[in-house]
Image (tube, helix red, strand yellow):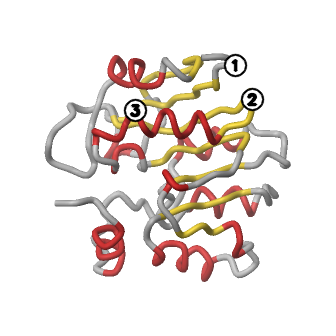
Amino acid sequence: MELNKEYWENRYLTKETQWDLGEISTPVKNYIDQLTNKNLKILIPGAGNSYEAEYLYQKGFKNVYVIDIASTPLANLSKRIKSFPGEQLIHKDFFDLHLKFDLIIEQTFFCALDPDLRLDYARKTYELLNPNGKIAGLLFNFPLTNQGPPFGGNKTAYEKTFDPYFNIKTLEKCYNSIKPRQGNELFFIFEKKQTL
């Protein structure tokens, strides 16, 4: 099975989107609630229906960008928020993006990638961030399997993946996960290293 554009588009069209909570997850919402700089340029990769982008936009963050390889979820967001700028809805492969951001919010994208791409993801997020940029969000905390998505992982493996590019500020078990995900999520904040 190849996790390509057609695969993801089909998942949305057939509504096989078990990962979709229908709303922003509590840990990400709480993180956004403590952000004070409304001018931050924020990226949500592999954003799906992107309730995170919707929440940010409604809170006055207008510099929010969403990228997804599938067009259906981008259209869904556009229907929900008519005023969301079309140029900030990017329909392309995350690895082909060449913009700069202050913050990347991770919500079920990393765990949906082929695990062979994890080091590439860490490198790419590093490239996309401005100096002092951060990546924050959720990573799944259950054993990595060949069956997925989602693909699991653990704290030690994530540290090994991200440590070459980021200072690990926070990487801990979520205390405020939704019930079905309790015990299976790690909340993290990684800050871009100044020099490699």
Residue 41: x and y in percent read 76, 49
Q: Is residue 49 above or below residue 137?
A: below
Q: Nearer the viewer, residue 30 or 66?
A: 66
Q: Quadrant of the C terminus?
A: top right
Residue 42: x and y in percent read 69, 49
Left or right: 164, with 152 as reference point: right
Q: Nearer the viewer, residue 27 or 122?
A: 122
Kindly identify which residue carries mark 2. Answer: 131
Which residue is at a point 49% across and 31% down the rendered structure image? Answer: 187
Q: Secondary structure at mark 2?
A: strand
Q: Amino acid at mark 2?
A: Pro
Left or right: 138, with 131 as reference point: left
Q: Amino acid at mark 1?
A: Gln
Kindly identify which residue carries mark 3. Answer: 119
N-terminal of the pair, mark 3 or mark 2, is 3
Marking on residue 93:
none
Q: CA distance from mark 3 to mark 2?
A: 20 Å
Which residue is at a point 28% across and 79% down the rendered structure image? Answer: 14
N-terminal of the pair, mark 2 or mark 1, is 2
Q: CA distance from mark 1 to mark 3?
A: 18 Å
* Contact between labelled residues 1 and 2, with CB atoms less than 8 Å apart: yes
Which residue is at a point 26% across and 43% down the rendered structure image? Answer: 151
Q: CA distance from mark 2 to mark 1?
A: 7 Å
Kindly identify which residue carries mark 1. Answer: 194
Q: Secondary structure at mark 3?
A: helix
* Contact between labelled residues 2 and 3, with CB atoms less than 8 Å apart: no
Left or right: 83, with 71 as reference point: right
